[in-house]
Image: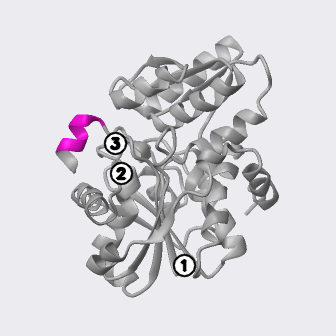
Amino acid sequence: MGARRLSIGRVEQATRVIDSVFLDSPQFVCEPLGEELGARLAIKVETLNPIRSFKGRGTEFLVSEAEDGVPLMCASAGNFGQAMAYSCRKRALELTVYASTNANPLKVGRMRALGARVVLHGSDFDEAKIEARRVAHERGARFVEDGLDVETLEGAGTMGLEWLRFPEPLDALLVPLGNGAMFNGVAGVMKHRSPDTRMVAVGAAGAPAMIESWRTGRLVTHDRVETVADGIGVRVPVPQALEDMNGLVDDALLVDEGSIIDAMRLLHRHAGVVTEPSGAVGVAAVMERPESFRDQLVGTIVCGGNLTVDQTREWL
């Protein structure tokens, strides 16, 4: 295994750069939720900010170091694009976001409202990403990739620093796994400062490529993803993100669609939190495997809360 890309010093530096609206998000033990699931469940709510997602932590740090005058391009299922747009607008940087033609319309609208040029291309996130990378190379723009650009990990790692201030050490921390920036950032900090905390990556069974790749030790891709959890719906993993996961993962779990929806409803009922599917997979994992977490202090990150009106009616 090579040297770690993630530097704790850089994560600490990020806390001084990131807009304070994204930092120190609420984290607390939700007693009624824990009583139902048989574990002491601590949730970190990353939805109470202008983009309703943790992604601003990484983009704030990345954009703070971006070169003036160089246009930026990225691909996004929605939340990363919103975060990039928010951060680029403050620095008057040109941003183009590629999203799939099936992207969440609420997220697409918010990206545009925040000043990004949004191009819809392809049937899923990975097709949009391939096109964004091609066009960026053609036009001399910088292509920013969530999970590959190390600043996205360093920004996400600030959540790990905040978990370390929790009144008690966590027995386990369940982190949604998409492109890997959140998991690798948070786990990199926790393994350095709280090595006894079990780090559990959680993905959707309908988008298993990242976890299958980690389990087999080789790159696994799929022709399509079939999950409501668009924020973690990765079909083609980022190879560097898989390398970053080495030594950080104590367990990796895939959860079913029904459990994800049920977990969203439990979070709404017991914590008053509106989460999108990706933010509920940690709770879904506890629901599906209660014996693995019984009577333990278990943390999870509610990483995003962008739902359309129709999705809210249907799922909550």
CA neighbours of label 2 inside 10 A, class few (<14), some (14 to 19), many (20+) = many
* Callout 3 amino acid: Val
State how far apart marks 2 and 3 are (Cα). 20 Å
Residue 98 falls inside the magenta stretch: no
Is residue 198 shown above or below 80? below
Q: Which residue is mark 3?
A: 225
* Callout 2 amino acid: Thr
Compare marks 2 and 1 and give the one earlier in the sequence: 1
Residue 309 falls inside the magenta stretch: yes
Q: Residue at x 62, y 52 (%)?
A: 23
Residue 103 seen from this side: no
Compare marks 3 and 1 and give the one earlier in the sequence: 1
Residue 293 seen from this side: yes
Is residue 17 shown above or below 246? above
Question: Horizontal and vertical percent for residue 29?
Answer: 44, 74
Point out the stretch of residues depicted in magenta: 308-313
Label at residue 170: 1
Task: Tell me which colouring the rendered structure shows.
Answer: one colour
Q: Residue at x 36, y 57 (%)?
A: 280
Q: Which residue is mark 2?
A: 275
Question: Horizontal and vertical percent for residue 125?
Answer: 43, 33
Dot 2 and dot 3 residues touching (CB under 8 Å): no
State how far apart marks 3 and 1 are (Cα). 32 Å
Q: Residue furthest left?
A: 314
- Residue sitting nearer the eye, 106 or 234: 106
Is residue 252 shown above or below 52? below
Question: Horizontal and vertical percent for residue 33?
Answer: 31, 72
Q: Secondary structure at mark 3?
A: loop
Q: Residue furthest top?
A: 139
Q: Residue at x 40, y 64 (%)?
A: 282
CA neighbours of label 1 inside 10 A, class few (<14), some (14 to 19), many (20+) = many
